[in-house]
Amino acid sequence: MSGEPDALAVVNQLRDLASDPLNRRAIVQDQGCLPGLILFLDHPNPQVVYSALLALRYLAECRANREKMRSELGMMLSLQNVIQKTTTPGDTQILATEVYDLLQSSSTADGDCTNEMNSRRRKAQFFLGATNKRAKTVVLHIDGLDDTSRRSLCEDALLKIKGVISFTFQMAVQRCVVRIRSDLKAEALATAIASTKVMKAQQVVKGESGEELLLPFQDAPVDVEQNTDLPDYLPEDESPMKEQDKAVSRVGAHQDGGSNWLSTAANFLSRSFYW
């Protein structure tokens, strides 16, 4: 990561960008920033967690953002985890509770303008080129994913599957977000994880009212085509660097500079949570 900003620097810049009301809609609509902030809630550095919560608090002040934020996969669960964790500092718990209550109280009317967008983005997207039509994202809840050795077993199992592009873990909530080719069945992921003999996967989906549901996979294993070398990467159909209409201004700076920095932050988030 030499030459790139670290996690605290990135989250602090996102916090500063979010403090400007003119930036808040663009940040929430960005494909990487909101899922990235959710992942920061599970960061081991308490300063990173607190700064991420401040950014989310700023974003939630925009009433039009609340429904989309509340329905973002992992948002409410991650906030609950911060609130309930016994090691969370008191001021961080208070801030997390404030954000949670703001989002929980958001009315359906507030989110009418974003319902169509939410229906197209049901799952977390924090990879560059996430709109690639040849790929899809599957969110797994993995029973038994509770330490680094289990995580290594899970990584080894997923790396063997031909068609897995990338994955990232949310250890605090026992989840793995996997990006796969569109022709690969999610059941193949469950079969690979079950082969560890110590873990079992369920798929995380959204219900009709926006709540998260856990769907068990069939017990019968499916055939898994294995990689003989490295994972099967896809060329990205779209590059977010070309999206010039999402300029975001940094506090006290010109809009072009803010847009460039947001692009840097998005690139950092993508690389940080890749694999």
Image (spheres, rainbow, N blue to C red):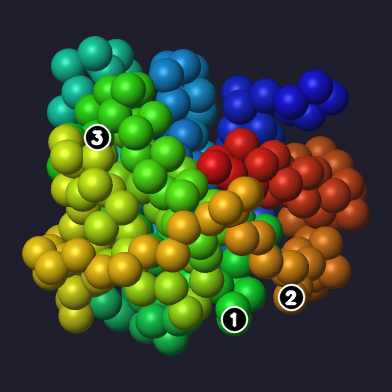
Disc number for residue 90? none
Q: Exactly how many numbered labels are in the figure?
A: 3
Query: Crowding near pointer 2: few (<14 within 10 Å), some, many (20+)?
Result: few
**Amino acid at dot 1:** Lys
Most distant residue in the front direction? 228
Q: Is residue 254 visible?
A: yes
Q: Considering only order in the chain, which callout, 1 or 2, is on the residue closer to the N terminus? A: 1
Mark before the other along the chain sequence, 3 or 1: 1
Q: Between 100 and 84, which is closer to the camera in this rendering?
A: 84
Q: Residue 220: horizontal and vertical position, in percent?
A: 13, 68
Q: Position of residue 159 (x, y in %)?
A: 48, 47
Q: Residue at coordinates 66% horizontally, 42% vertically from top-left?
A: 271
Quarter occupied by residue 78: top left
Kind of residue sitting beneath label 2 = Asp
Q: Secondary structure at mark 2?
A: loop
> Image check: 93 left or right of 177?
left
- Residue under circle 1? 133
Residue at left 68%, top 48%? 266
Quadrant of the image containing the C terminus: top right
Count residues near mark 3 (Cα–Cα under 10 Å), then give few for <14, some for 14-19, many for 20+.
many
Up-down relation of residue 244 to residue 229 (above or below): below
Quick check: marks 2 and 1 in contact, CB under 8 Å?
yes
Sooner in the amino-acid sequence: mark 2 or mark 3 = 3
**Which residue is identified by label 2?**
237
Q: Are marks 3 and 1 in contact (CB under 8 Å)?
A: no
- How far apart marks 2 and 1 lie (CA) works out to 8 Å
Q: Residue at x 39, y 81 (%)?
A: 119
